[in-house]
Amino acid sequence: MKPAPFQYHRARDVDGAAGLLAELGEDAKVIAGGQSLVAMMNYRLARPGHLVDIAGLRELDRMHRDADGALRIGALTTHHTVESDPAGVLEAGFEVLNRAMTWIGHLPIRTRGTVGGSMAHGDATAEWCLLAVTLGAQFVARGPRGERTIAAGDFFLGYYTTALDPDEILVEIVFPRPAPHAALTEFAERRGDFALVAAAVDLDVEDGEVRSGRVALGGVASAAVRVPEAEAVLADGGSFEACASAAAQAVEPPADASGSTHYRRELVRTLVRRACEEAVSS
Amino acid sequence: MSDVSMNDGPMSDVPMSERKLVGRAVRRREDPRLLAGRGRFVDDIALPGMLHAQFVRSTVAHAELASVDVSAVLEVPGVVAAFTAEDLELGDIVAQLGRPLSEFVPTAMPVLARDKVRYVGEPIAIVVARDAYAAEDGLEAAKISYVTLPPVMSEEAAFAADAPLVHAEAAHNTLVDVSLFATDGIDGIFTSAPCVVEVDTRTGRQNALPLETRGAVAHWDDREEQLVLHTCTQIPHQVRTVASRCLRLDERAVRVVVPDMGGGFGQKCVVGREEIAAAAAALRLRRPVKWIEDRKDALTASFLAREQHYRARAAFDADGRILALDTDVVCDMGAYSCYPFTAGIEPLMASAEMPGVYKVPAYRVRGRAVTTNKAPTGPYRGVSRPQYVMVMERLLERAARELALDPVEIRRRNVITDFPYTGVNNITYDPGSYLESLNLCELLVREEGWYEKQTAAAAEGRHLGIGYACFSERTGYGSAAFAQRKMKVVPGFDISEVRMDTSGTVSFTTGTMNHGQSHETTMAQIVADELALDIAKVRLHQGDTDRITYGFGTFASRSITIGGSAVRLAAAKLGDKLRAIAAARWDITPDDVELTSGAARRRNASDVLTYEQIADIAYLQAHLLPKDIEPGLSVTATFDVFNDGTFSNATHGCVVELHADTGQVEILRYVCVEDCGVAINPQVVEGQCRGGIAQGIAGALFEQVTYDAQGEPSATGFMDYKVPTAHEIPDVLIHHLETPCAFTETGAKGAGEGGTIGAPAAVLNAVNDALRPTGVELDHTPITPETVHRALNGAPSLELSS
Amino acid sequence: MNTDPVVTHPPLQLIALDVNGEQHEVITEPRRTLVDVLRHDLRLTGTHVGCEHGICGACTVLVDERPVRACLMFAAQAEGARIRTVESLSDGDGGLNDLQRAFTEHHALQCGFCTPGFLILADGFLAERPDASKEEIREVVASNLCRCTGYQTIVEAIDACATARRGACATPCDMSAGKEH
């Protein structure tokens, strides 16, 4: 379990990294925290000829709120930084992110793993991808052709596939509006594992009543997905139970050794309900 | 039996010899180096010029090897050599039983595959390179062509009429087939019994999973004309024997040295192929060669265990007393027989010992080992006992339901209470506390209010269950017990040498092999007590075939029972010599000399000779010795058990909650009442219990090695092979009972495996207790969340379709 | 100073590492993981390798005082960071610090293979969260695998160490203190 040979490049700035990616082509891969990539390289399931290390780009390791309340997270911010939120930038609206971090692996993974790395990796069960889809995040990417912003709905294209071009660097993730009544929950056989199913909701609550909300699931398709059928129930004033049932009926999760389609659907029902309950009480 | 409090707590320092150390939680001698990062494990060894090996392994489960071409491997930068079976011409590893061919078919395991491969991961060629990275590069350049054969991936496939044969010599893919006991009239008992219950139980294939994978560093020592093989093994002398045979060296020319070992649990209790191949490469290249198994190989291509299928039925009278037991057990042993235990290890253990703690008047068993295209199996902590105990406990639970008896009460009516007891399986059980442990365990669970909590939870629609497992475990298998198994290698005795040097300090040896059990501490406690010597002046040596005359290593909870007894006998013998020398100096009889505080003292007098002074005479002033006392202070003693061994016992109680919305099984409480006789070091015993229970829970709820139809193993990492963490494993309340063993030198019984043995049954019974309102009963492990979810929600069981 | 936007390394590269306060230079292929360089190039063999895919935690080290998996990091990525391994816990005479002593008192190790990973994990965690509850400690202990102990005594040892440190620190003091001399 030793990786295949590669050349190592340390980027000094984003444009330099993007330029190098353009020059090296498909054989190059960006490494940030490396918590997924290095494991895959040790198994030789990934064998890039070149690694472009962007971890030194300190300007991507920051987290702040805009004047309009939007949260901007630099791609190199670690899960642990979000979890501990030293500057308190998640207060008043983004506590869901802080709480969700405890689902990501374990402490020694969260200290190295980065928000951008997780997003760019695009695992179908990853907490960050699910949060992005639920909260309508926008992805700021920079490449040789300049900077562009990609909506979450357009970012995750399937198993480990995103809309990032091979020579683009994900620099920032923007969560445009506070989500005071949001929650993420999941189920795995063992603590810290990838979820069998993960669910996240972001509820719009007025005068103590849920008016509408966004519901998204991880582990039921090739990428995190919104579930309009479940959201419609919320918009119609339906119960959490009804919302959860609608979500369960709407999806066709793939079966594997950890669970059948039937079982995963049942987990969807449980987890959407739990997420809703946690969201209103938060 | 006495009820003992072990709340001695950790000791702050090592006391002088007036206080007996046996029975105390003496702090471990092993700890300082391990805590400081100064342990020396096999991968920590680096020798000048050392090369690194990895193995080209089969990518198919069953095939003839059409060609093995490693020429391109040699072109890979950093690769130094590559060898195939043809290049090395090594002898095969062949494990034997002294049984007729109708009962046991011996099969050869070549060091590197020749002609045929029988599982994904089987080693085909060894690649040696300047570092582990280049070695792995080299693997990718090997060209193997296979003529694939249909893989045999289940018991049913193996027994099928037209099944392909894994080994041509093993018809019906059967390596072991024994039918034992068959009490006269047993069929009649089943016909007329008021209550007959059956279970059909399958247990998942597991990996013992020491956190340190297997590994070796081999080099040729020109000065000693000796191959030195550093390897993490539980059985150094058996590795030496096999290595010398495979490599065609005199046994003297092989020295096996075991450094610190990161667990073994049985997986390192067999002779592996890779360490022999690494040694062969080192001989060829005359350079040190290191092989460290990576985790992927450890999960897919190492020795596995525990995949068993029981079809068992038991007859009961109307009062719930067992009348007869009839069992058919099939163990899927994978592709090869392991050395030295053979493929008989699991079926023979299950067949011989299944009646366990219960009075079973009539018994019949058929035990089979089937060979399949899976990685081979070896011993794993508990060997078959976690499985047959689970089956016995299921039979009792089922009978209790049929007869409307309390599950604990039905056990009370059946456990052996009069000792010694000779069972229908021709085994004589020495005294234990079967009933006492059962009663106390139930009392502890009851006193904590779990029965009330269960009732209250049920009223809220929650699902709490309480389950027990009552069992004993034969430990201290001596030569007699293993000879009964008809092994060709009969492990049994142990030898200890105890030596005092001129400074009055003691070095001593054991033929057992610590890999976490704390031998350096517990055996030193025994010696320090026997010689009335400060434990700091007592040092154990183990795991070096040049330093230890002979030994069978550590397994079957034999170390403290047999090894510890040999150590005590040898220490006593040295004590005799110390007293004899002192007596001669004082011109009195040795009976008038006592050993206290590191010195010989004349009874009722003030004469004292310190050990240092006696040693001075024994070595440096030998002319002062009487004629009948030889110079030097080195003695040897052996110990063996000439009866059926000694039985540790325990009752485990487990409380679970089943979560209806996820199917999760949450363990709320775990209680263990155990009796391993005299606990040399109660803290160590508790450690063995807790660790064993964790492994038992792992088997009950989490871990399983599975294969697809082509024979590809599903788990190549810890994502899929789900070793539980601190989040899943509960705290365990332990209570000790003490029924000393009458024939070990210390009164100790073995403590290494009990935890693992009881846990699967306790967990499964607790789950089934919680499922009681649903009418569903689960009989297979591991129990997955989906299985529980289906049971609680009225969905069709997946188990039924398997 | 090189001002190119990108520094490209040849197949072998010189890596400067700060390990336990000592400066080391290693010439190595960039693909060598931090744990392999620590163990085999610097001969700091206290850090162990258990899975090489980031789950078992036997290779846990501190990078800038935070616990990380040294098997999921290339040594080249560790340049410029402060690395601390199990060898840093006890003093040169082999005296054990309070955390190590708690492990031995509670019998929190058997074979000892996973132990350095747990010690370093706990060391990094308690430095950040000296007031951690036993349940929080259990959650962090769940980061690593142990096959021998059943975890209970590891949790108890770390909790006892944290409790003792808090008791000794009625007034604010250096949490890293506590070596036995």
Image (cartoon, coloured by chain):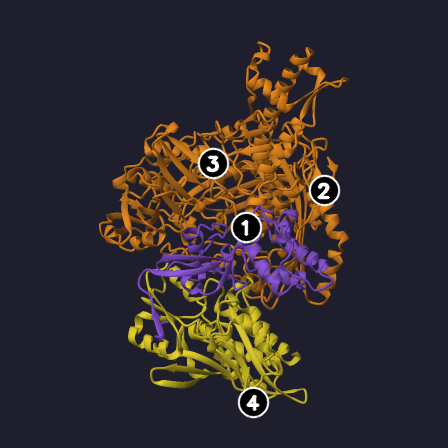
Q: Can residue B41 be seen at all in this image of the molecule?
A: yes
Residue B577, quarter of picture: top right
**Alpha carbon separation for disc pair 3 and 1:** 20 Å
Q: Chain of mark 1?
A: C
The amino acid at mark 2 is Met
Q: Amino acid at mark 4?
A: Ala
Mark 2 vs mark 4, CA separation in Å? 64 Å
- Residue beneath disc 1: C147
Distance CA(mark 2)–CA(mark 3): 32 Å
Residue under label 4:
A67
Write down which chain is painted purple: C
Tell me, what hue is chain B? Answer: orange
Q: Residue furthest front?
A: C1
The residue carrying pointer 4 sits among few (fewer than 14), some (14 to 19) or many (20 or more) residues within 10 Å by Cα, namely few
Q: Could you say which is closer to the camera, residue C8 or residue A74?
A: C8
Q: Give the x, y percent position of residue A7.
A: 33, 65
- Which residue does the numbered mark 3 point to in the structure image? B235
Q: Under tag 2, what secondary structure?
A: loop
What amino acid does circle 3 point to?
Ile
Say which residue label 2 marks.
B6
The mark closer to the camera, 4 or 1, is: 4
Q: For the residues marked 1 and 2, what is the alpha-carbon distance in whole angstroms?
A: 24 Å
Q: In front: B438, or B746?
A: B746
Left or right of B548, for residue A277: right
